[in-house]
Amino acid sequence: MTYLGKETTFRWLGHASFLVGTPSGRNILIDPWLENPSCPDDCKEFEQVDLILLTHGHWDHFTSVVPQAKKHGARVVCNVELAHWLRKLGLEEDQLVEMNKGGTVEVCGLQVTMTDARHSSGVVIDDEYRYAGEACGFVVETENEFRFFYAGDTSVFGDMALIAELYSPSMAILPIGDVYTMGPREAAKAAHLLGVQMVIPMHFGSFPRLHGTPEQLREAIGNLPIEVIDIEPGQIIE
């Protein structure tokens, strides 16, 4: 089925959290940390969440997963190790869609592929970091065959060119803050390797140490035909 005239929407919730609306009316919550200092107060509650994508277990991507999944009955796509901890934290078995890198699942009418990311991962249980598998990214294909890449927390790596070759995403959501992830210079190279036409920067400005800026990314991209979509927390783009 084609969804003529309906676009995929992206609302940045601050830091690395996004709410994505699909042409058929599905809502995807990605790496939700709704207590982040950039998240507007009117963006902390949702009428509907169908699917949550979780790239790794660090608290700034994981904190709101369980309450949001329980409240909305949303399904959660994550790696095997994170699925284990989410069961321990009270999520129902039928809510969990566990997978690993290189795999593709169809869930909520969407094609979701788990890709590589270069980053650490752990989830805090009883005040201790516990093993939570490896960090990942996602390629999502919506109902009208629009594909976007959510990188999660990562450095740039050469196999981003394979993501481009295999999945041809049109848009990428990339971290630019530096220190804990790649900065603007590395993100510009990532956008080039991914072959995308558009980039939404994330994971910057939440704290002083995350000092990369969209303008620095734009300068690093230079004359390449890649649009940097600089949005404010709470803003929706199509």
Image (spheres, grey):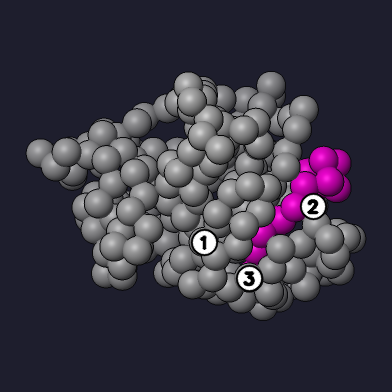
* Magenta stretch in the rendered image: 67-79
Residues at discs 1 and 3 in contact (Cβ within 8 Å): no
Left or right: 210, with 28 as reference point: left
Residue 81 sits in quarter? bottom right
Q: How far apart are marks 1 and 2 (CA)?
A: 22 Å
Q: Mark 1 or mark 2, which is nearer to you?
A: 1
Q: Which residue is denoted by mark 2 in the rendering? A: 66
Res 99 label:
3
Distance, label 2 to label 3, CA atoms, is: 18 Å
Q: In this view, does 47 lie to the left or right of 115?
A: right
Q: Mark 1 points at which residue?
A: 113
Question: Which residue: 18% across, 44% down?
Answer: 220
The 10 Å Cα crowd at callout 2, few under 14, some 14 to 19, many 20 or more, is some
Q: Residues within 10 Å of mark 3 (few under 14, many from 20)?
A: some
Name the residue nearer the viewer: 120 or 85: 85
Q: Which circle's residue, 1 or 2, is located before the other in the chain?
A: 2
Query: Residue 130 is drawn in which quadrant?
Result: bottom right
Sequence-earlier tag: 1 or 3: 3
Which of label 2 and label 3 is nearer to you?
3
Marks 1 and 2 in Cβ contact (< 8 Å): no
Residue type of the residue flagged with mark 1? Thr
Q: In the depicted view, which residue is nearer to us: 188 or 19?
A: 19
User: Which element carries disc 1, helix, strand or loop?
Assistant: strand
Q: Specify the farthest residue to the front.
A: 1
The residue type indicated by label 2 comes to Val
User: Label for residue 140?
Assistant: none
